[in-house]
Image: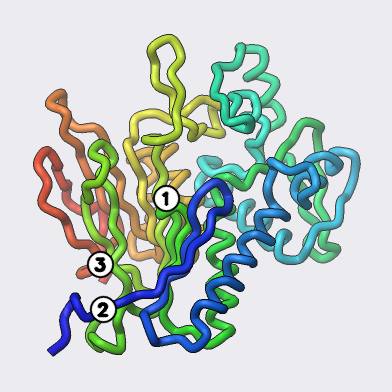
Amino acid sequence: MHGESDLHTLVVGRDAMACRFEVIFNAGEVADDTALAVDALDLVDEIEARITVYRDTSELSRINARAAEGWQPVGRDLLALLLLARDLHERTAGAFDMAAGSLVRTWGFLQRQGRTPTPDDLSRARASAGMQWVEIDAPRERVRFSKPGVELNPGAIGKGWALDRVVDRLRHAGVTSTLVHGGTSSVRAVGAHGAAVLPERRGWPVGVRHPLRPGRRLATVMLEDRALGTSGSGTQFFVDRGRRLGHILDPRSGLPAEGVLSATVIAPTAAEADALSTALYVSGPDGLPRIATPGGAVGAILVLPGDTSGGIRVLTANLAAGQLFVEPCTGVKWEPPAAASE
């Protein structure tokens, strides 16, 4: 008889994209596991070098600098990312917007020094923000901006996109079970944790943190061939005149999103989970039916402030039976699911 204590893993990690990336295997299951993990993390470094907006030499920075002047060539994989970003922008009614870089800049988040912009600065930034200004010529693999000042910023999708590329490479190498994550807020799972020891095990257990109590879990999600993304401003914010402002901007208003403590999305890919969790954080409960469409491929966990006693409310949508395991915790009100999938 085997149990949880018999499960062992190999973890290989590296810092990238301002967080810790890790590749996790079931111990002894994959030949050359360490070499495969190192190769996967090398790929993350390569992706960061191409899509970061913190280096002038990156492909994305080159596009930002020149695309308002005319068509710019774009690599096939980066083109796929832009097409996905455009689709997600439409699916979320603008709550996710990869072309909101001008807003990120004017709020000081590009320099990681938050500041409140003047009304004029914010107005100028809003005028040049939005995927509607990004023209993509897929057959010719090129892109241009239809007005000056537009900036692409992959902050809400880049980590997930990198994880998806890592999973593609590992699967091509024959890996059937692995968990990869970037900063624990972006996770992609393949196969199962300890499948050889516990054949009945389905998926990998992934914790959802309590947004107000560091170190505490709200729930555990069993993630099987799926991805999970969590968005929140618990650790990245600044204080302006006594008001705490988070780093997640609502691209529709240009202002920091408010009213949500955290948003978690379970989706087929990590890029989708990242972008959609940001969109759900921005749009709040009104965004649940659009983002976690009943009977669709996306599920969600939305954490909101509770009453004046300091508790929290948790809304769930479109989660399969047996996928979510709630942790005992005082002050947490779990509301009935908005929808459930079979």
Q: Which residue lies under the disc numbered 3?
A: 323
- Label 1: which residue? 290
Task: Point out which mark residue 78 bears.
Answer: none
The type of colouring in the image is: rainbow
Q: Is residue 215 above or below residue 175?
A: above
Foreground pick, 261 / 204: 204
Residue for point 64% across, 52% down? 86
Q: Residue at x 59, y 77 (%)?
A: 169
Amino acid beneath label 3: Gln
| Left or right of residue 187, residue 120 in this image | right
| Number of numbered discs visible in the structure rendering | 3
Task: Classify residue 8 by image quadrant.
Answer: bottom left
Out of 112 and 116, give the one closest to the viewer.
112
| Vertical side of 204 occupied by 124: above or below | above
Which of the two discs, 1 and 3, sits closer to the camera?
3
Q: Nearer the viewer, residue 234 or 31?
A: 31
Judging by the rendered image, the residue that carries numbered circle 2 is 7
Circle 2: residue type = Leu
Near mark 1 (Cα within 10 A), the count class, few <14, some 14-19 or many ≥20, is some
Q: CA distance from mark 1 to mark 2?
A: 38 Å
SS for tag 3? loop
The residue at 10%/51% (across/down) is 328
Residue 96 picture location, percent across and down:
54, 44
The quarter of the picture where the N terminus appears is bottom left
Determine the CA span between mark 1 and mark 3.
21 Å
Could you tell me which secondary element the residue under label 1 belongs to? helix
Q: Position of residue 71 (x, y in %)?
A: 88, 49
Identify residue type, mark 1: Arg
| Numbered disc in front, either 1 or 2 | 2
Q: Secondary structure at mark 2?
A: loop
Near mark 3 (Cα within 10 A), the count class, few <14, some 14-19 or many ≥20, is: some
